[in-house]
Image: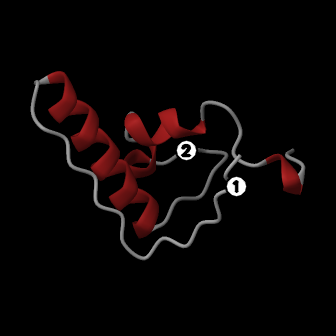
Amino acid sequence: MYISYSGVPHGVDLFYVFGVPLVGHERYKYDEVDQEASRKAMTIWSDFTKGKYVHVYYKNINTAVDHF
């Protein structure tokens, strides 16, 4: 159980890097957006390990960033 203001729990991104949204998980529900995000995360990491140029393009993402 997570507190609503706690943000993203540590390590949740690893589920996407290892393709969990593509195969499913007993405790989490994933939709098509999650599956596409997982495919992109796996592509970014595999291109990086192959020494390829990694270009990340974000579209339709609304985020608030605090600048210190």
x then y, percent, for residue 51: 11, 25
x then y, percent, for residue 67: 67, 52
Q: Is residue 36 left or right of residue 12?
A: left
Q: Which residue is mark 2?
A: 25
Q: Looking at the image, which is closer to me, 7 or 34?
A: 7
In the rendered view, tell whether residue 13 sits above or below residue 51: below
Q: Nearer the viewer, mark 1 or mark 2?
A: 1
In the rendered view, tell whether residue 56 sits above or below residue 33: above
- What type is the residue that disc 2 sits on? His
Mark 1 neighbour density, 10 Å: few (under 14) some (14–19) many (20 or more): few
x then y, percent, for residue 65: 64, 58
- Name which of mark 1 and mark 2 comes first in the sequence: 2
Instruction: Label 1: state its secondary structure.
Output: loop
Q: Disc 1 and disc 2: Cα gap in Å? A: 33 Å
Determine the residue positioned at 67% across, 32% down. 10
Determine the residue positioned at 45% across, 59% down. 34
